[in-house]
Amino acid sequence: MFSGWMLAILFLILPTSVAAQELHLVAYAGFAGFQAPVWAPKDLGLMAKYGFNGDVVLVPGSVRQIQALQGGSIQFAQVDAATAINAINQGADLVMISGSLNSFPYSFMAQKEIRKPEDLIGKKIGILAIGGATETATILALKAWKVPRQSVTIFPAGDPVARIAALSTRAIDATVLSYPDINEAVRVGMHALADMSEMKEASFPMNVMAARRSFVEKNRDAVKRYQQAYAEGTYQFINNRDKGMAVLAKWLRSKNSKTTEETYQYFAKKFSFPTRVSQVGLRNTLELLSQKPGAKIDMNVNKYLDESTLDELEHEGFFKRLAGKS
């Protein structure tokens, strides 16, 4: 990831033809294992392979990523479907173009005395942000367990590190976490009330690649090149353990090889290839959001999703060639 002064030097030394190319920034939201499809194309040289002039940048949380997309400071962002849908419904010039994870990558972590869902009644549940994936996951879990939403207190409690600290001090009673943060929560005495990826209600596009719709319309070649890099990065992560482990070891900065291995094994089985957004999951999300008080959700999937560049790649045989099925 380039800093500002490094970019300035780079543009001075690069040939004019290369420096003149626009640098496209792709945002990731944090340091959980499900961010790997953004990291892999960069680390494995796939952006360069497909002629995509890009880099990755940290923009914490889907809400901030959406703001950065709208402001034009980034061109692509891996966000969750609920946040993207909410923004589009509010008039944002955004569209989802692909996806790599179509279920919640969370476990519902709780204090040890909370042994069954109804034990959550009267308790405090921490989330990352209102309107984001952690809130959506929490509400879906409560609904599946028939625990009334009004019987618990749900509030923003910070990033995973902050929420684990809040669990350890009993400032909150439960939260949803992903790998490798699940291991840290267990270390401080928490346990998994449920693995949300195994819940039938958890069909939810967690990783969707979003961009401004106007950008997609005007820069289809760049979008298509990025789609190739994103798809192959996801494919290589799923199918090449050594490469996948190397990506995670670099970005998670974990000195515990067991933690890295567990994170890899979990996500290698969860990521989607081809990198398409689940239509079922998208409709589930629209249905859930439409039930919120005062919500006016357009249920037309095409308002939110444009996979036409993926359709072109599929027609050209790209995914079959990548999977060795041509």
Image (cartoon, rainbow, N blue to C red):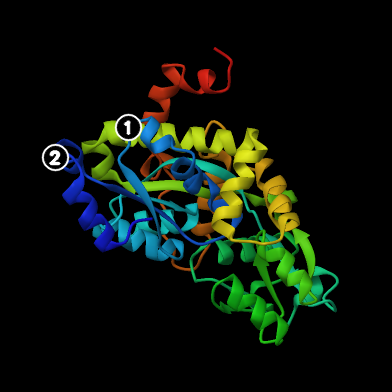
Question: How many labels sit on residues?
Answer: 2
* Secondary structure type for disc 1: loop
Residue linked to disc 2: 16
Q: Where is residue 242 in the image (x, y as percent from the top left)?
A: 65, 39
Residue type marked 2: Thr
Q: Position of residue 316 (x, y in %)?
A: 41, 16
Name the residue located 39 percent from the left edge and 45 percent from the top edge.
304
Do we see residue 207 in this rendering?
yes
Question: Residue placed farthest to the front in the image?
Answer: 13
Q: Reading the chain from its start, which is encountered first: label 1 or label 2? A: 2
Quarter assignment of residue 142: bottom right
Residue toward you, 274 or 143: 274
Name the residue located 75 percent from the left edge and 78 percent from the top edge.
121
Q: Image check: 21 left or right of 231? A: left
Residue type marked 1: Gly
Label 2, residues with CA under 10 Å away: few <14, some 14-19, many ≥20? few
Label 1, residues with CA under 10 Å away: few <14, some 14-19, many ≥20? some
Quarter assignment of residue 68: bottom left
Question: Residue placed farthest to the top in the image?
Answer: 326
Measure the alpha-carbon separation of dots 1 and 2. Answer: 16 Å
Residue toward you, 253 or 96: 253
Compared with residue 83, is residue 240 higher up or lower down, i.e. above or below?
Answer: above
Compared with residue 305, is residue 32 higher up or lower down, i.e. above or below?
Answer: below
Residue toward you, 2 or 30: 2
Q: Where is residue 268 in the image (x, y as percent from the top left)?
A: 66, 42
Name the residue located 42 percent from the left edge and 29 percent from the top edge.
310
Q: Where is residue 202 in the image (x, y as percent from the top left)?
A: 66, 51
Residue linked to disc 1: 51
